[in-house]
Image: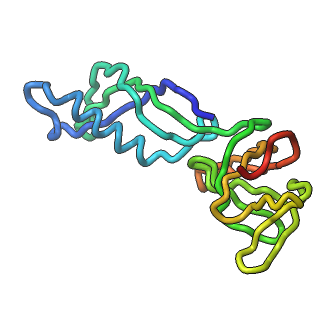
Amino acid sequence: MFIKVKLPSNVMIPAEAMDPNGLMIQRAVLIRLLDAFASKKATKDLGYFIALKNLEEIGEGRIRETTGEIIFPVVFSGITFKMFKGEIVHGVVRQVHKSGVFLRCGPCENVYLSQYKMPGYDYIVEGNPLFMNQNMSRIQIGSTVRFIVLDIQWKEAEKEFIALASLEGNNLGPF
């Protein structure tokens, strides 16, 4: 679910942003690195970027002759979030449809739980739509549901994952 990663990167800093005494290099690198990290939503291999933890290393800067920018190789550690097939996780219901529900699990907005993967639950349309079983357990907007991840798919264009979920198993369902 949460993964601690070390990532190498190159940070470009305009020459005019540099302090002549060299005291502000780390600050300038950090600001640029945070901007770049914030604009990256996710990658297929690492998942969603959650936090930048430590700046481990700043390499020696090289001047780019064409633009005059200074490129610093850096290594930083961070935390990412990625669901895996077969993992049991929690999600919050955000939409209820006759065919199933859409959940949000951490930064992943598109987790689909089909009605066919909710054994014993029936769709009820009175008032707010919901799914309910014989024990009066409800799956409705705002409910927290424990589920197993059946499959994950990466959408390159949107830079996000979609997941299929199931309640088939022990101790799965709303709580």
Question: Is residue 43 or residue 138 the one in the foreground?
Answer: 138
Q: Is residue 173 above or below residue 49?
A: below
Q: Is residue 175 above or below residue 10?
A: below
Question: Is residue 54 or residue 103 the one in the foreground?
Answer: 103
Could you tell whether 136 is left or right of 161 in the image?
right
Q: Position of residue 130 (x, y in %)?
A: 76, 69
Residue sitting at x 54%, y 35%: 80
Could you tell whether 161 is left or right of 54 in the image?
right
Residue sitting at x 34%, y 34%: 11
Res 20 → quadrant: top left
Could you tell whether 125 is left or right of 48 in the image?
right
Q: Position of residue 106 (x, y in %)?
A: 58, 47
Q: Position of residue 68 (x, y in %)?
A: 22, 37
Question: Is residue 61 or residue 169 the one in the foreground?
Answer: 169
**Which quarter of the figure is the N terminus placed in?**
top right
Res 87 → quadrant: top right
Residue 152 in view in this figure: yes
